[in-house]
Image: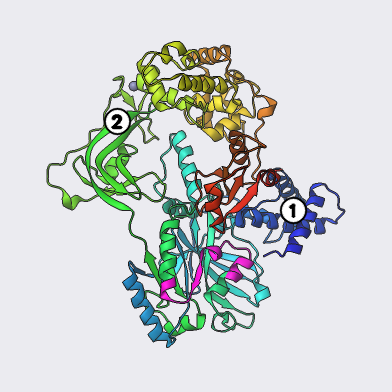
Amino acid sequence: MYSKEQQQQLNTLTLQLVKEAVTLSEAEKAKALRNVINYHDWRYYVLSEPVITDYDYDKLFAELKQLELSNPELQTPDSPTQRVARGLTSEFETVQHLVSMLSLENSYNEADLNDFDRKIKELTGNPEPEYCVEPKFDGSSIALVYENDLLIRAATRGDGTEGDDITNNAKALSSIPLRAPFSKYGIAKIEIRGEVIIQKHIFEKMNEERKAKGEKIFQNARNTASGSLRTKDPNESRARNLEAILYHISFAEDASGNNLLAGKLESHYHCIEILYDCGFKTPLHEMKVCRNMEEVHEFIQLWDKKRHTFNIDTDGMVVKVNSLKQQQQCGSTTHHPRWAIAYKFAAKQAHSKLLKVEFQVGRTGAVTPVAKIEPVPLAGVTISSISLHNEDFILEKDIHIGDTVIVERAGEVIPYIVGVVPDLRTGHEHKIHFPRHCPSCGSPLVKPEEEAVWRCDNADCPAQTEERAIHFVSKDAMNIDGCGRETVVEFIQRGFIKTIEDLYRLPYTEILGLEGWKEKSVNNLKAGIEDSKNRPLWRLLNALGIRHVGVTTSKDISSHIRSIFDLQKMSVEDLTNIEGIGPKVAQSIFDFFSNEGNIHLLHELKRLGVNTENRPEDALSKNNKLQGKTFLFTGSLQKFTRDRAKQLVEENGGKLLSGVSANLNYLVVGEDAGSKLAKAQKIPSIVVLNEDEFLKMIE
Ligand SMILES: [Zn+2]
């Protein structure tokens, strides 16, 4: 998309614009801003390698917006400001695809693929056809049309002939260029196909946040992507972090109307290279051109393993004849192209029996039904316990005790129940009775109209106290080393912990006398507790377990206050004035800080030495330099501790992995690195860095 020189020029221009070190007419300036913003969008959304800070980006964006506002004639259709949608879409118009979107025929084993290979050889008369093999992304299909380099239309697959016009929503996706330089390939009009997806880790994070807010969690990434793509509010498409991956050119013609797919464009691989070069996210680095079926089988097997750690859901592979000429020789049936076939990976589903349902009370009082099933091995782990989410879920899936349930687990995702098999019922199944009283304290459960969850609202409910304490010490909260769930449960049972502040006055001498506790583990616990007194304010805020307040909200709020006690003085209105805080969250915070017991707890924590202030050194970094990148540290580090390294990665938007896999981007090695380094050197995609090189990345 951008040559090295162009990138250098754009980087320099960016600097000049940021520092206002260049004199330009308004028209020139608008053009310069457009160019640099589009370039940084590409770096951020397509390459995941941003080179400027969010702060500078926002500044440039605001400047362009202002310029266009005062000089509307300077606004162009490909201006990045056009991604921000105005108003809602009331109804999607139906549009006709330039070329029908056929579905692919499925295959499930090597024999099916060998049959496919035989047919291709017959149809093309070529004894050695090349195949392009690529992962089949599990998302929602789209078709984009560009005319004279401008995006003019985006549509859903629909019935294959006609789909919904979702142009406005597609424009909100920053990985879709509004302008793409197809003209340099002599292409005047083009239709391209792809898939809109949500990366697994983003999907998981979304669900964590929804869970923390008491909202219904999404069942799977594909449905969420397709739902978000058809949302009436285009800004929501953006909010949900959708991405488009483009993998097929279905139509391409030059200015005189000549079909380029029958001439100038030679192979599928070449098409993908063009899309990549024009600034799209493509499977270019995930695909392989195979010269025979052995290579095809081998590559598929490789991906059958790799898919579990790959960041995007894939349910199979697609095998396509590489030569476009040979594709035409094969043609299509009314349903499928003959030159391509999908290979489906073995299902990650299993059958099991639902033995009983337990009802667990969470820290906010939410009662969650948990299915206990006959243990069943699935995708590498044995599963015996699965969340049934809420009463609606049970009713919707018509789940009974004694039913045969279908359990699914995709990659590292939490297992879930897809449904039941009614045909296997014996008549001995019985209904699941959702309790109307708290299983822990017996208080009547309540359920607000708009919520899916039943709740115990007794503040002294023992189950809630336990869960609150467990949440308080957890990783995203006070992150207390040496004190996990089991320890908390043990201390509560022994009466050491009755309220949260008891964590800071544990009877260590007594603990040392208990079975299973040695001097070392007690010292660890003590060090972990002491250390936690010094956490940044947002951790304390999150640790309090206020309803609807998770990590993100805690960070948003704590950057606006000097002390946790400031919240005591704030009205619901004051709170809603903080960006990212809605009325529901504000009310919940207000209620929490209106409760005397909670204020007492905070004063006690402060008295016991826990930090309750927003200190300058805790200022949150808004840096995304390592966005989307994965890291692992090995060997003995000289420049920073492991904990600091972890913190640096996370502060900059990166992610830590626990082992060397193809999913790892960077291995940072200290002195005397051993087996991890050796393993990483065998995987070409992993970049090995020393500590200085790592520090340079985040400078
Ligand atoms: Zn209760």
CA neighbours of label 1 inside 10 A, class few (<14), some (14 to 19), many (20+): some
Q: Does 386 sit above or below residue 79?
A: above
What amino acid is labelled 1 in the image? Answer: Glu
Q: Secondary structure at mark 2?
A: strand
Q: CA distance from mark 2 to mark 1?
A: 57 Å
**Which of the two labelled residues, at mark 2 and mark 1, occupies the earlier sequence position?**
1
Q: Does the rendering let one see residue 507? A: no
Residue positioned most to the right: 23
Residue 65 located left or right of residue 172: right
Q: Which residue is mark 1?
A: 68
Q: Which residues are magenta?
A: 273-295
State the count of labels: 2
Hey, what amino acid is under mark 2?
Phe
- The answer to which of 57 and 513 lies nearer the viewer is 513
Q: Can see residue 622?
A: yes
Q: Secondary structure at mark 1?
A: helix
Q: Report which residue position mark 2 lands on.
A: 359
